Image: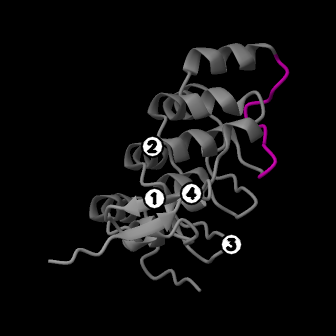
Amino acid sequence: MLKFLRFVEDLNGRWRRFSGGAESEMDPKSVYSKHAYRIRKGDLPRLHIPAFAGDVPEMERVLLTGKYLLNSRDSENRTALHVASACGRREVVIFLTEEKQCQLNVCDNDYKTPLIAAVQCQEEECATILLECGADPNPVDIHGNTALHYAAYHQNISMAEKLLSGNADIEATNK
């Protein structure tokens, strides 16, 4: 019996065996892929590094120095909340939204909010926290997608239900 193996090129240019999953996960260049929301630790400013790592005490220390503002941006115009949401750092998201009350609906260079980043990267817990704190589910990114489009593409029914409960526009169309 012949067995066909599928290989994909990873983000470092190396080929690896593809083990299944959604088509978007096979193609790291897909708009919908969680790999399309690239975060490289080396490119992050000082405030964003603890968000990337999920280190709340370090984030508090960095903020106490007074050198960084809560809503500081990196080179891609992302806040620490974008980074924490995309990386699934629940504790950091709670810290930034509930304790520090940072801006929830800020957009990066691709017009993605932290909520869109969380849903695109399939970080449902972070997306739920953002919705509970009042994040708007209806902003549209540079590709014409809302958070609901990403949830639908990834066939994440529970996330789609939460977005719809948070007043996501079911009639929103993309490109």
Going by the numbered disc 4, the residue's amino acid type is Arg
Q: Quadrant of the C terminus?
A: bottom right
Residue 94 screen position, x and y as percent: 49, 31
Query: Is 72 above or below relative to 27?
Result: above
> Which residue is painted at 57% across and 29% down in the image?
53
- Label 2 element class: helix
> Which residue is painted at 48% across and 66% down in the image?
8
Q: Mark 3: few, some, or many residues within 10 Å (few <14, many ≥20)?
A: few
Prevailing SS of the magenta stretch? loop
Image coloring type: one colour
Disc 4, disc 3: CB below 8 Å? no
Residue 37 screen position, x and y as percent: 60, 57
130 or 24, which lies in front?
24
Identify the residue under disc 1. 16
Query: Is 111 above or below relative to 73?
Result: below
Residue 14: numbered disc: 4
Residue 142: numbered disc: 3
Per the model, the C-alpha gap separating discs 3 and 2 is 22 Å
Q: Mark 2: few, some, or many residues within 10 Å (few <14, many ≥20)?
A: many
**Residue farthest front in this picture:** 1
